[in-house]
Image (cartoon, rainbow, N blue to C red):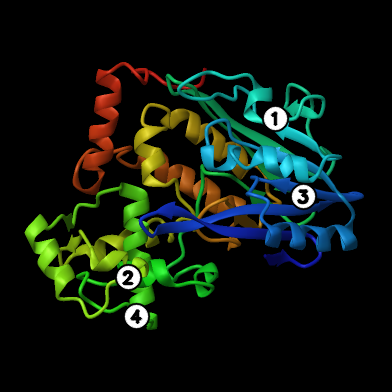
Amino acid sequence: MRELVPNRVWCFEQLHGVWYVAVPIRMTVVKVEEGLLLYAPLPPTAELLLGLRALEAQHGPVLSIVLATSSGLEHKVPLAALARAFPAATVWVSDQQWSFPVPLPSRWLGFPAGRTKVLFRDGLPHPDQLVWIPLGPINLGLGTFHEIACVDLCTGTLLVTDALVAISSTPPPIFDLDPTPLLFHGRDKGSEAMIDTPEQRLKGWKRIVLFANFFRPEFLSIPSFPELVIDAMTADEANPRNHFAVFPFRWAPSWEEHAEQLITHGYQVAPCRLAPVLERLVFVRAKETYLEWLRTLAKQTTIKSLVSAHYSASQLMNSVELENYADSVEAKDWAPSDGSWQLLAAIDRALLRLKIVPSQSESC
């Protein structure tokens, strides 16, 4: 738990990922009149509930829980349990919620009957204090991508779920609790010890960023099985923490320059970006929809900072930088297929070939 704006905005963070490719996932708490609003649900662990009860004691009860995305599974799954923990709170969800492989009614997804409302269709929570700006819905074939951004007029904090992120050049502070993911990926071979140094943490963070955004970056190769076995057998220590010295990655020398380009991309324009995985798989055929949303956000001149549900927060940012970022998006080569984008492009082509996603997926 961290306080982002004194007595007004807080966040709760957990780690989210597989094979130590872990990035922060974040729920933001905003003080509203007579209570609190929760944006982007997290699993209600004992630690999270303890922190929220402390905030309630000071600032009033949780009044609203907002699931602002229709497709983000990692945000949708915790909603039911979080709603049960706060039975008096109104639950707000973006429109066109969906499930896969079987389409289920909202009640079966855990959305509480009688106190779940759809954003815009059933109104908006605290509209005199918060501005709500929709992105989409975008047709993904199996369902939709639909996200609602929120601007807290009091503090100028822009809340988004997935459609904008700020990727810091250093590991986020949550890794101080357990730097294992950083140290695991900071090695070059499985036989290397996981030694905790600032250099190893930074090296691991840069590689995690590449994995999380491209799945298989351009400068990554997979060693042969015999090489993996020999490497693991020569390790001084093999345990669950280091995955028994199995490390199936080899990085070419130029990987770090590639990582730094991704992290600092556009910072001379704006300290935010759309994650490549979303650009290539979600907005690949919806650039104009994304641009329209960015320019609508840029009209909110009260914006001072960005808090997204992933990577780093809070990031200083203003409406001029958002407009500049929109200009750069309009001018750039959108959703490329070369370099580190090759695997994402292959996934998109496979989905098109199987007719799982539509060839045209602008707003539906």
Q: CA distance from mark 3 to mark 2?
A: 50 Å
Residue topped by disc 2:
239
Mark 1 or 3, closer to the camera: 1
Mark 4 or 1, closer to the camera: 1
Q: Tell me the quarter of the picture where residue 150 sits.
A: top right
Image spot of residue 99 (x, y percent)? 53, 25
Q: Residue at x 37, y 73 (%)?
A: 202
Name above or below for residue 174 compared with residue 73: below
As helix, strand or loop, the secondary structure at mark 3 comes to loop
Residue topped by disc 3:
153
- Upstream in sequence: badge 4 or badge 1: 1
Q: CA distance from mark 2 to mark 1?
A: 41 Å
Image spot of residue 225 (x, y percent)? 11, 56
342 sits to left or right of 127: left
User: Which residue type does callout 1 highlight?
Assistant: Phe
In the picture, the quarter occupied by the N terminus is: bottom right
As helix, strand or loop, the secondary structure at mark 1 comes to loop
116 sits to left or right of 99: right
Q: CA distance from mark 4 to mark 3?
A: 40 Å
Mark 1 is surrounded, within 10 Å at the Cα level, by few (under 14), some (14 to 19) or many (20 or more) other residues, namely: many
Mark 4 or 2, closer to the camera: 2
As helix, strand or loop, the secondary structure at mark 4 comes to helix
User: Which residue type does callout 2 highlight?
Assistant: Asn
Whether tag 1 and tag 3 are in contact, CB under 8 A, the answer is: no
Q: Tell me the quarter of the picture where residue 130 sits.
A: top right
Whether tag 3 and tag 2 are in contact, CB under 8 A, the answer is: no
Residue topped by disc 1:
111
Q: CA distance from mark 4 to mark 2?
A: 23 Å
User: Which residue type does callout 3 highlight?
Assistant: Leu
Residue topped by disc 4:
199
- Upstream in sequence: badge 4 or badge 3: 3
- Upstream in sequence: badge 3 or badge 2: 3
